[in-house]
Image (tube, helix red, strand yellow):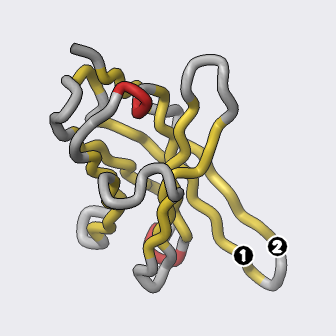
């Protein structure tokens, strides 16, 4: 099983950036998938999540600028950030979790770096 993030990088404040999490070895569509951000010297925080039925939730600090979506045909989950701010800088990790009869199955990607700087 692998979760592989791609598409991060350097962007300017006010711009947009899109990155993806691609899954292999699992039926990605049954998993709840979240994006976590870890800024320098901070903990890893959940910023957005999409459930298996497509319900999306966002942290209050990013609502209105972050959009999480699924592409079931490609077995990927994307994150788009609009109107980038310096505070968006960090490593973004993809997390997939699924409960079966109360037992948690969870996977993490290796992370993709997003740097917002002028």
Q: Based on the displayed image, in which of its 4 quarters is residue 105 positioned?
A: bottom right
How far across and down, in percent of the image, does residue 54 sit?
A: 41, 80
Classify the position of the C terminus by image quarter: top left
The residue positioned 81% from the left and 85% from the top of the image is 101
Instruction: Give the labeled residue for mark 2.
Output: 103
Q: For label 2, count other residues whose C-alpha is less than 10 Å away and answer few (under 14), some (14-19) or many (20+).
A: few
The residue positioned 28% from the left and 16% from the top of the image is 117
How far across and down, in percent of the image, does residue 30 sit?
A: 52, 77
Which of 114/28 is in front? 114
Relative to 12, is 79 on the left or the right? right
Relative to 42, is 116 on the left or the right? left
Say if mark 2 contacts mark 1, CB within 8 Å: yes
Which of 104/36 is in front? 36
Query: Does the image show residue 76?
Result: no
Query: Does the image show residue 77?
Result: yes
**In the image, residue 93 above or below residue 64:** above
**In the image, residue 6 above or below residue 96:** above
**In the image, residue 107 above or below residue 72:** above
Instruction: Give the labeled residue for mark 1.
Output: 99
């Amino acid at each position: 099983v692998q979760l592989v993030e791609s598409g991060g990088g350097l962007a300017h404040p006010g711009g947009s950036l899109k990155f993806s999490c691609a899954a292999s070895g699992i039926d990605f569509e049954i998993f709840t998938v979240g994006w976590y951000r870890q800024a320098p010297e901070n903990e890893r925080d959940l910023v957005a999540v999409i459930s298996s039925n497509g319900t999306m939730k966002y942290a209050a600090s990013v609502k209105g600028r972050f959009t999480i979506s699924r592409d079931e045909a490609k077995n990927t989950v994307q994150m788009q950030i609009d109107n980038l701010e310096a505070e968006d800088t960090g490593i973004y990790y993809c997390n997939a979790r699924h409960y079966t009869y109360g037992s948690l199955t969870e996977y993490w990607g290796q992370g993709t770096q997003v740097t917002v700087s002028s």
